[in-house]
Image: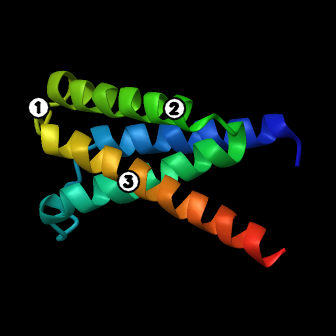
């Protein structure tokens, strides 16, 4: 696939995630509040994977981008919604998702290099 298609897919996924973080889930019968931190972790793990797959940034660049995105999401939740508020622990869960992705990424990379 062409690199610009990877970029477009990544931006689409980031847009969808942003929409998800700013949307209130109503009348689904499922309360996601108890899973909030786990969802932050999972979404940021996946977003970091998308970022790495499509743009291939250096570790420090990806960490900076994802940390900034996490702060932006918390800011937007606090000021653009009436049903969500910024929480430091959400941002911590975001960063843990990023860190765990890179731990897995480098472990797989090291394992692949050993087996070749």
Q: Nearer the viewer, mark 1 or mark 3?
A: 3
Please rate how many residues cluster around mark 2, counting C-alpha atoms within 10 Å: few if below 14, some from 14 to 19, many from 20: few
Disc 1 + disc 2, Cβ < 8 Å: no
Left or right, 33 with respect to 94, comes to left
The vertical placement of 51 against 74, above or below, is: below
Disc 3 + disc 2, Cβ < 8 Å: no
Q: Residue at x 67, y 72 (%)?
A: 111
Circle 1 residue: 82
Mark 1 or mark 3, earlier in chain: 1
Left or right, 7 with respect to 42, comes to right
Extreme residue toward the front, this view = 114
The foreground one among 80 and 110 is 110
Q: Report the disc number at residue 60.
A: 2
Q: Position of residue 17 (x, y in %)?
A: 43, 44
The coloring applied to the image is rainbow
The foreground one among 62 and 77 is 62
Left or right, 50 with respect to 60, comes to right
Q: Residue at x 39, y 39 (%)?
A: 19
The vertical placement of 37 against 66, above or below, is: below
User: How far apart are the two marked residues, 3 and 2, measured between alpha carbons?
Assistant: 15 Å
Mark 3 or mark 2, earlier in chain: 2
Extreme residue toward the bottom, this view = 115
Circle 3 residue: 97
The foreground one among 90 and 111 is 111
Camera sees residue 84: no
């Amino acid at each position: 696939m062409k690199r610009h298609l990877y970029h477009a897919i990544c931006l689409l996924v980031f847009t969808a995630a942003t929409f998800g973080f700013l949307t209130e889930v109503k009348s689904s019968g499922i309360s996601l509040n108890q899973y909030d931190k786990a969802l932050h972790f999972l979404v940021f793990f996946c977003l970091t994977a998308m970022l790495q797959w499509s743009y291939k940034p250096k570790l420090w660049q990806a960490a900076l981008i994802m940390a900034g995105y996490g702060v932006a999401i918390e800011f937007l939740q606090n000021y653009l919604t009436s049903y969500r508020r910024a929480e430091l622990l959400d941002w911590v869960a975001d960063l843990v998702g990023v860190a765990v992705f890179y731990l897995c990424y480098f472990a797989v990379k090291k394992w692949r290099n050993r087996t070749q």
